[in-house]
Image (tube, rainbow, N blue to C red):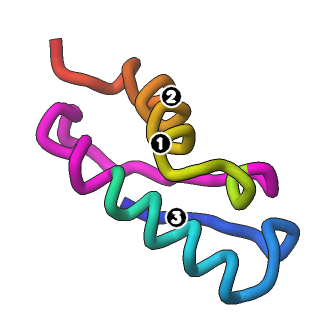
Amino acid sequence: MAYTIGRKVGSAVVRNRVRRRIRMLMKDAAPTLRPGAYLIGVAPAAALLPYEELGKTLSKALKYFEEP
C-alpha cells in the first residue's frame, strides 16, 4: 500500500496525521481486500474529517476491491 498526500492537504503535521489515520484504517480493511497494490490519495478535505467519517469514506471507496 502506498499513500499520496499532497501539500495542499496542509502542513507536514497535518499530512502525517492523515497518513497515520489512513494507515490504521487500511490495516483494519486489509484482510477483506483482494491481493494487489493499492495507491491511496486524499483531497484536502480529508484533513477536516473526523476519524469515523474518514473510515466510512474509505470503506465506500474500497468496497469494489473486497473479495467476493
Q: Which residue is mark 2?
A: 61
The image shows residue 41 at horizontal and vertical percentages of: 62, 53
- Asked which quadrant contains residue 54, the reply is top right
Secondary structure beneath dot 3 equals strand
- Packing grade of label 3 (10 A; few <14, some 14-19, many >=20) is some
- Identity, as a three-letter code, of the amino acid under mark 2: Ala
Q: Residues within 10 Å of mark 1 (few under 14, many from 20)?
A: few
Q: Earlier in the sequence, mark 3 or mark 1?
A: 3
Q: Estimate the spatial distance between the alpha carbons at disc 3 and disc 1, rounded to whole Å.
A: 19 Å
Label 1 sits on residue:
52
Q: Which residues are magenta?
A: 26-45
Vertical arrangement, residue 9 with respect to residue 38, above or below:
below
Secondary element under disc 2, as helix, strand or loop, is helix
With respect to residue 4, does 7 lie above or below? Answer: below
Q: Is residue 59 above or below residue 50?
A: above
Q: Nearer the viewer, mark 1 or mark 2?
A: 1
In the picture as drawn, the residue positioned furthest to the bottom comes out as 12
In the depicted view, which residue is nearer to us: 68 or 14? 14
Expressed as whole percent of the image width and height from the top left, the position of residue 30 reads 21, 45
Nearest to N terminus: mark 1 or mark 2:
1
> Are the residues flagged by discs 3 and 1 in contact, CB closer than 8 Å?
no
3D distance between C-alphas at marks 1 and 2 = 14 Å
What's under tag 3, amino acid-wise?
Answer: Tyr
Considering the image in quadrants, where does the N terminus appear? bottom left
Q: Is residue 67 left or right of residue 66?
A: left
Residue labelled with disc 3: 3
Question: Where 48 sits versus 35, above or below?
Answer: below
Determine contact: label 1, label 2, CB under 8 Å: no
Alpha carbon of mark 2 to alpha carbon of mark 3: how far? 14 Å
Q: Residues within 10 Å of mark 2 (few under 14, many from 20)?
A: few
Estimate the x, y position of residue 23 in percent, counting from the top left: 38, 63
